[in-house]
Image (cartoon, grey):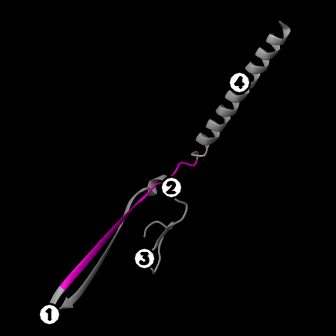
């Protein structure tokens, strides 16, 4: 291949080092086998397609952001509950 990051192994596996966003897409493998049965040449073909999805390097930020927001909301509820309890005790 032209790209040094992509290696095709002898067993047919494709190894992509340092996967980037440009590598995502559908990878297709076609295998053809011809053989003779009763004097006739038969052919069998199998096509296997796989989709490669590449996550963003910053994909981990979304779950972290959600966790931080939940913690902040929990703190607001706790503080609001404490203030309300103190106000009720003063009366």
Residue 12 — which label?
Answer: 3
Q: Are marks 1 and 2 in contact (CB under 8 Å)?
A: no
Give above or below for 90 relative to 58. above
Pointer 1 local density, CA inside 10 Å: few below 14, some 14–19, many at least 20: few
On screen, residue 74 versus residue 31, left or right, reads right
Q: What's the CA distance linking mark 2 and mark 4?
A: 42 Å
Quadrant where the image shows the C terminus: top right
Spot the residue most to the top: 91
For residue 20, the mark is 2
Query: With respect to residue 82, does 59 lie above or below?
Result: below
Q: Nearer the viewer, residue 62 or 21?
A: 62
Horizontal side of 66 relative to 76 (left or right) equals: left
Residue neighbourhood size for the residue with mark 4, other residues' Cα within 10 Å, grouped as few (<14), some (14–19), many (≥20) = few
Q: Residues within 10 Å of mark 2 (few under 14, many from 20)?
A: few
Measured as percent of width and height from the top left, residue 5 is found at 51, 66
SS type, badge 2: loop
Choose the circle earlier in sequence order: 3 or 4.
Answer: 3
Counting residues from the N terminus, which is met first, the one under dot 1 or under dot 2? Answer: 2
Residue 19, how many percent across, how many down? 52, 59
- Circle on res. 65: none
C-alpha distance separating marks 3 and 2: 21 Å
Q: Which residue does the numbered mark 4 point to in the structure image?
A: 77
């Amino acid at each position: 291949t032209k790209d040094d990051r992509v290696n095709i192994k002898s067993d047919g596996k494709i190894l992509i080092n340092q996967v980037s966003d440009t590598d995502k897409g559908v990878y297709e493998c076609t295998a053809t086998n011809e053989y003779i049965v009763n004097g006739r040449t038969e052919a069998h073909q199998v096509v296997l397609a796989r989709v490669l999805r590449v996550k963003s390097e910053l994909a981990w930020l979304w779950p972290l952001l959600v966790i931080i927001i939940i913690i902040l909301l929990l703190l607001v509820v706790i503080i609001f509950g404490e203030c309300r309890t103190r106000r009720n005790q003063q009366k």
